[in-house]
Image: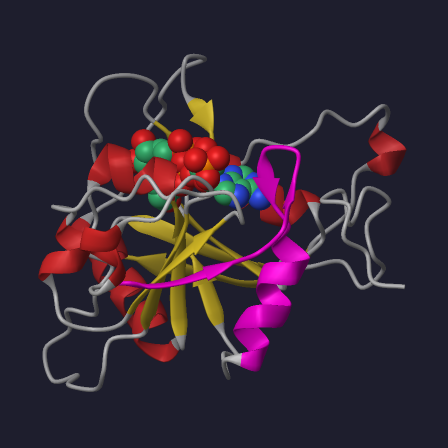
Protein backbone atom coordinates (compact mmCIF):
# COMPACT_ATOMS: atom_id res chain seq x y z
CA UNK A 1 0.00 0.00 0.00
CA UNK A 2 0.99 3.59 -0.43
CA UNK A 3 2.26 4.95 2.87
CA UNK A 4 -0.03 7.98 2.69
CA UNK A 5 -3.11 8.97 0.77
CA UNK A 6 -4.14 12.14 -1.00
CA UNK A 7 -6.93 13.61 1.11
CA UNK A 8 -9.67 14.79 -1.23
CA UNK A 9 -11.13 14.53 -4.68
CA UNK A 10 -10.70 11.70 -7.10
CA UNK A 11 -8.14 9.00 -6.45
CA UNK A 12 -4.70 9.90 -7.73
CA UNK A 13 -1.50 7.92 -7.93
CA UNK A 14 1.21 9.11 -5.57
CA UNK A 15 3.71 6.41 -6.43
CA UNK A 16 5.12 5.68 -9.89
CA UNK A 17 4.09 3.28 -12.64
CA UNK A 18 6.99 1.04 -11.57
CA UNK A 19 5.45 0.67 -8.10
CA UNK A 20 2.08 -0.19 -9.63
CA UNK A 21 3.73 -2.81 -11.80
CA UNK A 22 5.46 -4.21 -8.72
CA UNK A 23 2.04 -4.63 -7.07
CA UNK A 24 1.05 -6.86 -9.97
CA UNK A 25 3.77 -9.33 -8.95
CA UNK A 26 2.42 -9.48 -5.41
CA UNK A 27 -1.07 -10.11 -6.78
CA UNK A 28 0.23 -12.84 -9.07
CA UNK A 29 1.83 -14.79 -6.22
CA UNK A 30 -1.21 -14.52 -3.95
CA UNK A 31 -4.05 -16.98 -3.89
CA UNK A 32 -6.52 -14.20 -3.06
CA UNK A 33 -6.64 -10.40 -3.29
CA UNK A 34 -8.92 -8.84 -0.71
CA UNK A 35 -10.37 -5.35 -0.49
CA UNK A 36 -13.16 -3.44 1.27
CA UNK A 37 -16.36 -2.15 -0.26
CA UNK A 38 -15.07 1.39 0.45
CA UNK A 39 -12.27 0.94 -2.10
CA UNK A 40 -14.64 -0.64 -4.63
CA UNK A 41 -17.06 2.29 -4.37
CA UNK A 42 -14.24 4.88 -4.50
CA UNK A 43 -11.95 3.41 -7.16
CA UNK A 44 -13.90 0.70 -9.01
CA UNK A 45 -10.75 -1.50 -9.23
CA UNK A 46 -10.42 -4.69 -11.29
CA UNK A 47 -7.89 -6.37 -8.98
CA UNK A 48 -6.76 -8.66 -11.79
CA UNK A 49 -3.21 -9.71 -12.64
CA UNK A 50 -2.03 -7.76 -15.68
CA UNK A 51 1.55 -8.84 -16.29
CA UNK A 52 3.18 -9.61 -19.62
CA UNK A 53 4.10 -13.27 -19.78
CA UNK A 54 2.03 -14.24 -16.75
CA UNK A 55 -0.93 -16.22 -17.86
CA UNK A 56 -2.11 -18.12 -14.83
CA UNK A 57 -5.54 -17.74 -13.31
CA UNK A 58 -6.40 -14.51 -11.53
CA UNK A 59 -6.41 -14.93 -7.74
CA UNK A 60 -9.82 -15.03 -6.15
CA UNK A 61 -10.94 -11.43 -5.67
CA UNK A 62 -12.64 -10.92 -2.33
CA UNK A 63 -14.71 -7.92 -1.22
CA UNK A 64 -15.64 -7.37 2.41
CA UNK A 65 -19.09 -5.95 2.07
CA UNK A 66 -21.21 -6.33 5.20
CA UNK A 67 -24.42 -5.00 3.63
CA UNK A 68 -23.72 -6.34 0.12
CA UNK A 69 -23.56 -2.96 -1.61
CA UNK A 70 -21.38 -4.18 -4.51
CA UNK A 71 -22.62 -2.30 -7.61
CA UNK A 72 -23.94 -4.61 -10.33
CA UNK A 73 -21.83 -2.71 -12.87
CA UNK A 74 -18.59 -2.81 -10.85
CA UNK A 75 -15.50 -3.37 -13.05
CA UNK A 76 -14.62 -6.37 -10.89
CA UNK A 77 -17.56 -8.15 -12.53
CA UNK A 78 -16.52 -7.27 -16.05
CA UNK A 79 -13.28 -9.28 -15.78
CA UNK A 80 -13.12 -13.04 -15.81
CA UNK A 81 -12.04 -14.83 -12.65
CA UNK A 82 -13.68 -15.75 -9.38
CA UNK A 83 -15.18 -13.10 -7.08
CA UNK A 84 -16.25 -13.67 -3.51
CA UNK A 85 -18.52 -11.27 -1.64
CA UNK A 86 -18.18 -11.59 2.12
CA UNK A 87 -21.25 -10.15 3.79
CA UNK A 88 -22.82 -10.06 7.20
CA UNK A 89 -25.63 -12.52 7.96
CA UNK A 90 -28.28 -9.79 7.64
CA UNK A 91 -27.29 -8.49 4.19
CA UNK A 92 -30.18 -8.43 1.72
CA UNK A 93 -30.37 -10.99 -1.07
CA UNK A 94 -29.27 -9.70 -4.46
CA UNK A 95 -30.84 -12.09 -6.99
CA UNK A 96 -29.21 -10.32 -9.96
CA UNK A 97 -25.79 -10.62 -8.39
CA UNK A 98 -26.02 -14.03 -6.81
CA UNK A 99 -25.54 -15.87 -10.11
CA UNK A 100 -22.39 -13.87 -10.93
CA UNK A 101 -20.70 -13.66 -7.54
CA UNK A 102 -20.22 -16.25 -4.84
CA UNK A 103 -21.26 -15.04 -1.41
CA UNK A 104 -20.35 -16.26 2.04
CA UNK A 105 -21.37 -14.74 5.33
CA UNK A 106 -19.31 -14.24 8.45
CA UNK A 107 -20.54 -12.94 11.80
CA UNK A 108 -20.34 -9.22 12.47
CA UNK A 109 -19.16 -7.61 15.67
CA UNK A 110 -20.95 -4.27 15.77
CA UNK A 111 -20.57 -2.81 12.31
CA UNK A 112 -17.45 -4.84 11.43
CA UNK A 113 -17.22 -8.31 10.00
CA UNK A 114 -15.11 -10.55 12.26
CA UNK A 115 -11.81 -10.74 10.47
CA UNK A 116 -10.46 -13.77 12.32
CA UNK A 117 -13.60 -15.71 11.33
CA UNK A 118 -13.08 -14.53 7.78
CA UNK A 119 -9.51 -15.84 7.74
CA UNK A 120 -10.65 -19.22 9.09
CA UNK A 121 -13.15 -19.39 6.23
CA UNK A 122 -10.50 -18.44 3.66
CA UNK A 123 -8.10 -21.08 5.02
CA UNK A 124 -10.85 -23.66 4.62
CA UNK A 125 -11.15 -22.58 0.99
CA UNK A 126 -7.44 -23.38 0.58
CA UNK A 127 -6.05 -19.85 0.63
CA UNK A 128 -2.54 -19.66 2.01
CA UNK A 129 -1.47 -16.15 0.94
CA UNK A 130 -3.99 -13.33 0.99
CA UNK A 131 -3.01 -9.89 -0.26
CA UNK A 132 -5.03 -7.10 1.35
CA UNK A 133 -5.28 -4.08 -0.96
CA UNK A 134 -7.72 -1.97 0.96
CA UNK A 135 -8.28 1.54 2.22
CA UNK A 136 -7.28 2.81 5.64
CA UNK A 137 -10.42 1.45 7.33
CA UNK A 138 -10.05 -2.21 6.48
CA UNK A 139 -6.25 -2.28 6.30
CA UNK A 140 -6.13 -0.66 9.76
CA UNK A 141 -8.68 -3.16 11.09
CA UNK A 142 -6.51 -6.07 9.97
CA UNK A 143 -3.42 -4.60 11.62
CA UNK A 144 -5.31 -3.71 14.81
CA UNK A 145 -6.63 -7.27 15.04
CA UNK A 146 -3.08 -8.66 14.86
CA UNK A 147 -3.85 -10.55 11.64
CA UNK A 148 -1.12 -9.19 9.36
CA UNK A 149 2.16 -11.07 8.81
CA UNK A 150 3.79 -8.59 6.47
CA UNK A 151 3.29 -4.97 5.43
CA UNK A 152 4.39 -3.82 1.98
CA UNK A 153 4.74 -0.03 1.82
CA UNK A 154 5.51 2.05 -1.24
CA UNK A 155 7.01 5.46 -0.47
CA UNK A 156 7.30 8.17 -3.12
CA UNK A 157 9.78 11.05 -2.77
CA UNK A 158 6.93 13.54 -2.45
CA UNK A 159 6.06 15.71 0.54
CA UNK A 160 2.29 15.91 0.74
CA UNK A 161 1.94 18.16 3.75
CA UNK A 162 -0.06 17.82 6.90
CA UNK A 163 -3.35 17.27 5.04
CA UNK A 164 -2.25 13.84 3.82
CA UNK A 165 -4.13 10.92 5.36
CA UNK A 166 -2.47 7.90 6.87
CA UNK A 167 -2.84 4.58 5.12
CA UNK A 168 -3.96 2.76 8.29
CA UNK A 169 -6.80 3.79 10.57
CA UNK A 170 -5.53 2.55 13.93
CA UNK A 171 -6.67 3.15 17.48
CA UNK A 172 -4.52 5.70 19.21
CA UNK A 173 -2.21 4.04 21.74
CA UNK A 174 -2.37 5.26 25.32
CA UNK A 175 1.43 5.36 25.42
CA UNK A 176 4.43 4.59 23.23
CA UNK A 177 5.07 1.45 25.32
CA UNK A 178 1.97 -0.05 23.70
CA UNK A 179 3.26 0.45 20.18
CA UNK A 180 4.71 -2.68 18.62
CA UNK A 181 8.05 -2.66 16.87
CA UNK A 182 7.81 -4.27 13.44
CA UNK A 183 10.89 -5.86 11.90
CA UNK A 184 12.47 -4.44 8.77
CA UNK A 185 12.61 -7.25 6.24
CA UNK A 186 13.72 -5.42 3.08
CA UNK A 187 14.14 -1.97 1.63
CA UNK A 188 14.35 -1.69 -2.17
CA UNK A 189 14.20 0.93 -4.88
CA UNK A 190 11.27 0.40 -7.24
CA UNK A 191 11.58 2.94 -10.02
CA UNK A 192 11.57 6.36 -8.32
CA UNK A 193 10.03 4.96 -5.15
CA UNK A 194 10.97 2.79 -2.21
CA UNK A 195 9.37 -0.50 -1.27
CA UNK A 196 9.59 -1.28 2.42
CA UNK A 197 8.64 -4.73 3.64
CA UNK A 198 8.01 -5.09 7.37
CA UNK A 199 7.31 -8.26 9.28
CA UNK A 200 4.93 -8.39 12.23
CA UNK A 201 6.28 -8.43 15.78
CA UNK A 202 6.61 -11.98 17.09
CA UNK A 203 4.51 -11.38 20.20
CA UNK A 204 0.81 -10.73 19.69
CA UNK A 205 0.11 -7.02 20.11
CA UNK A 206 -1.65 -5.97 23.28
CA UNK A 207 -4.67 -4.77 21.31
CA UNK A 208 -4.97 -7.93 19.21
CA UNK A 209 -8.30 -9.63 18.55
CA UNK A 210 -10.26 -6.43 18.98
CA UNK A 211 -12.83 -7.83 16.57
CA UNK A 212 -14.16 -9.82 19.50
CA UNK A 213 -13.54 -13.20 17.95
CA UNK A 214 -10.55 -14.58 19.81
CA UNK A 215 -10.86 -18.36 19.70
CA UNK A 216 -11.06 -20.15 23.07
N1 LIG B 1 -2.99 3.36 0.04
C1 LIG B 1 -3.36 2.33 -0.69
O1 LIG B 1 -2.52 1.55 -1.11
C2 LIG B 1 -4.82 2.10 -0.99
C3 LIG B 1 -5.29 0.83 -1.38
C4 LIG B 1 -6.65 0.66 -1.64
C5 LIG B 1 -7.50 1.77 -1.52
N2 LIG B 1 -7.02 2.98 -1.17
C6 LIG B 1 -7.91 4.14 -1.03
O2 LIG B 1 -8.71 3.97 0.11
C7 LIG B 1 -9.93 4.71 -0.06
C8 LIG B 1 -11.09 3.89 0.46
O3 LIG B 1 -10.83 3.63 1.82
P1 LIG B 1 -11.93 3.14 2.83
O4 LIG B 1 -11.29 3.14 4.16
O5 LIG B 1 -13.18 3.93 2.61
O6 LIG B 1 -12.32 1.69 2.27
P2 LIG B 1 -11.86 0.19 2.63
O7 LIG B 1 -10.98 0.17 3.82
O8 LIG B 1 -11.37 -0.44 1.37
O9 LIG B 1 -13.28 -0.46 2.96
C9 LIG B 1 -13.88 -0.13 4.18
C10 LIG B 1 -15.22 -0.85 4.30
O10 LIG B 1 -15.03 -2.25 4.43
C11 LIG B 1 -16.15 -2.78 5.10
N3 LIG B 1 -15.75 -3.69 6.17
C12 LIG B 1 -16.31 -4.92 6.40
N4 LIG B 1 -15.76 -5.48 7.47
C13 LIG B 1 -14.86 -4.63 7.96
C14 LIG B 1 -14.00 -4.69 9.09
N5 LIG B 1 -13.94 -5.75 9.91
N6 LIG B 1 -13.22 -3.63 9.32
C15 LIG B 1 -13.24 -2.56 8.50
N7 LIG B 1 -14.03 -2.44 7.40
C16 LIG B 1 -14.85 -3.48 7.15
C17 LIG B 1 -16.92 -1.60 5.71
O11 LIG B 1 -18.07 -1.33 4.90
P3 LIG B 1 -19.44 -2.13 5.23
O12 LIG B 1 -19.74 -1.87 6.69
O13 LIG B 1 -20.41 -1.58 4.29
O14 LIG B 1 -19.11 -3.57 4.97
C18 LIG B 1 -15.95 -0.45 5.55
O15 LIG B 1 -16.57 0.80 5.42
C19 LIG B 1 -10.03 5.05 -1.53
O16 LIG B 1 -9.87 6.45 -1.68
C20 LIG B 1 -8.89 4.31 -2.17
O17 LIG B 1 -8.31 5.05 -3.23
C21 LIG B 1 -5.71 3.15 -0.87
Question: Does the image show residue 146?
Answer: yes
Question: In the rendering, at what x and y percent does residue 157 appear?
Answer: 33, 36
Q: In front: 176, or 141?
A: 141
Q: In front: 84, or 187?
A: 84
Write the residue at 44% across / 43% down: 91
| Residue 199 in the figure: left or right of residue 10 | right
Write the residue at 80% across / 64% down: 202
Span of residues in magenta = 101-124
Write the residue at 37% across / 78% down: 29
Is 119 colored magenta in this rendering?
A: yes
Q: Quadrant of ligand 1?
A: top left
Q: Does residue 212 lie above or below 204 as drawn?
A: above
Q: Quadrant of residue 31?
A: bottom left
Q: Quadrant of the C terminus?
A: bottom right
| Residue 124 in the figure: left or right of residue 205 | left
What sort of colour scheme is used for the picture?
Answer: secondary structure
Q: Does residue 45 lie above or below 28 as drawn?
A: above
Question: In the rendering, at what x and y percent does residue 92 appear?
Answer: 39, 42
Q: Quadrant of residue 57?
A: bottom left
| Residue 5 in the figure: left or right of residue 76 | right
Is 187 colored magenta in this rendering?
A: no
Q: In front: 43, or 112?
A: 112
Write the residue at 79% across / 27% down: 173
Q: In front: 160, or 74?
A: 74
Q: Quadrant of residue 46?
A: bottom left
Question: In the rendering, at what x and y percent does residue 24 appear?
Answer: 26, 66
Q: Does residue 29 lie above or below 112 as drawn?
A: below
Question: In the rendering, at what x and y percent does residue 14 appear?
Answer: 26, 36
| Residue 143 in the figure: left or right of residue 50 | right
Count of marks overlaid on the render: 0
Amino acid sequence: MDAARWPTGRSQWITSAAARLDVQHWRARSSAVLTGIGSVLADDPRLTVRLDGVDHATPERIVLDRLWRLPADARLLSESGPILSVTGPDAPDRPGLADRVERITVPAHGDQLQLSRLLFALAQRGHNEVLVEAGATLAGAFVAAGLVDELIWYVAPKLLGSGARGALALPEPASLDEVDRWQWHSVDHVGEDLRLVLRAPLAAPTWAWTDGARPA
